[in-house]
Image (cartoon, grey):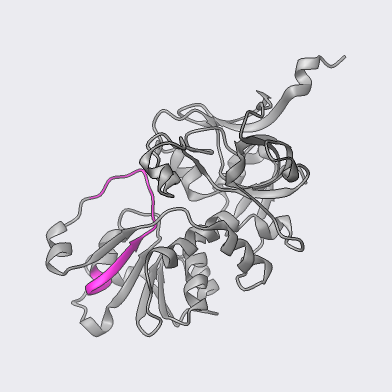
């Protein structure tokens, strides 16, 4: 006979501080004031999840994952109950200067799902209600799952006015770079994508003017680039610490580098090069969800299908070379 307490247990992928493991004994979280309990339908793996297993967030122990679609089962906002939602990552304290000035994600005590608090690689998760966004009618779970990373791509245009008459380079041929390139293409900008994987670069050819193999720029092959050969805007989305060095080689003097990569390793830079050449460097993180949902619903951006796995097969999912791997949980 099933024990009553077993009925409140759930399956999840749990990071114990050194490794990820599959568990079936975690308690279903309790819904507290100002929060919602979400039954996770699907969740996608992000490169940040892989970096966590390399020590990206020291001290974190908990359920991993932050890209999700779920159904609200309990909420401080009753109108959300039964609705499908996506959600932002960072819950601030609500009182500090960052929270009071619309910069909640920069709150010094902010908690990010799957990074500093329990995330979505589980059957259930809680999140602050004000961070949830309803999925529009007609948008499937399989499409809506891309909302969070697409919002991160849209953050670039929120931070930097990119003149479509100038040129841009995107460093990286992965998932985030693919989304960034599609967003830039909507603005009609002349764009070059630089990556290391021919099969991935092939996906960009429908909307990029040029794709280049990064080996061309590797040590021993780098030549002196003229201003005409460089770029006004360079978006670094390689997920590798070598990317910023390539960006500094490719950006024009008085140009702009937008830094999207996050990684565990540290790197060194020649800051005098940035000062002398008057290069603007902009860090860019999470972005606006509502415009991302609108673009997805209107079909103005398209992505390859997700390779779906069960939670118990997380090792295979994390090792997958697919464009996106994720977990079907409540579907």
At a point 42% along the width and 44% down the height, the residue shown is 100
Q: Is residue 31 above or below residue 156?
A: above
Quadrant in which residue 223 is drawn: bottom left
Judge whether residue 250 is colored magenta. yes
Given residues 289 and 231, the one toward you in this image is 289
Inspect the magenta stretch and tell me whether residue 129 lies in it.
no
Q: Is residue 221 visible?
A: no
> Dividing the image into 4 quarters, which one contains the N terminus?
top right
Is 259 located above or below residue 23 in the figure? below
| Image vertical order of residue 91 relative to residue 173, above or below | above
Whole-percent x and y of residue 241?
32, 53
**Which residue is located at x 14 percent, y 63 percent?**
275
Using the image as rendered, state which of residue 319 and residue 174 is in the foreground: 174
Give the x, y percent position of residue 279. 22, 67
The picture places residue 245, in percent across and down from the top left corner, at 25, 61
Magenta stretch: give its range: 249-267
């Amino acid at each position: 006979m099933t024990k009553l307490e077993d009925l409140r247990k759930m399956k999840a992928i749990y990071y114990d501080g050194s490794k990820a493991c599959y568990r079936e004994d975690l308690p279903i979280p309790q819904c507290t004031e100002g929060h919602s309990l979400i039954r996770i339908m699907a969740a996608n793996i992000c490169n940040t999840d892989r970096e966590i297993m390399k020590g990206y967030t020291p001290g974190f122990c908990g359920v991993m994952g932050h890209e999700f679609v779920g159904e609200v089962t309990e909420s401080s906002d009753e109108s959300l109950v039964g609705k499908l939602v996506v959600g932002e990552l960072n819950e601030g304290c609500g009182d500090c200067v960052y929270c009071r000035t619309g910069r909640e994600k920069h709150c010094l005590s902010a908690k990010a799902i799957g990074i500093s608090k329990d995330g979505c690689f589980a059957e259930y998760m809680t999140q602050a209600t004000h961070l949830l966004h309803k999925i529009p009618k007609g948008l499937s779970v399989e499409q809506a799952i891309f909302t969070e990373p697409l919002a991160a791509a849209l953050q670039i245009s929120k931070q930097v006015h990119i003149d479509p008459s100038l040129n841009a380079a995107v460093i990286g041929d992965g998932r985030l770079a693919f989304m960034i390139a599609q967003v830039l293409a909507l603005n009609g900008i002349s764009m070059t994508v630089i990556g290391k994987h021919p099969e991935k670069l092939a996906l960009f050819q429908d909307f990029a003017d040029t794709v280049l193999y990064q080996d061309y720029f590797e040590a021993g092959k780098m030549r002196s680039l003229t201003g005409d050969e460089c770029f006004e805007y360079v978006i670094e989305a390689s997920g590798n610490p070598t990317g910023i060095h390539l960006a500094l080689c490719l950006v024009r003097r008085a140009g702009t580098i937008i830094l999207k990569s996050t990684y565990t390793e540290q790197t060194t830079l020649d800051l005098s090069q940035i000062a002398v050449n008057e290069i603007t460097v902009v860090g860019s993180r999470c972005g606006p969800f509502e415009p991302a949902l609108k673009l997805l619903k209107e079909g103005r951006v398209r992505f390859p299908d997700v390779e779906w796995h069960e939670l118990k097969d997380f090792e295979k999912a994390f090792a997958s070379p697919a464009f996106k791997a994720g977990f079907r949980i409540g579907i």
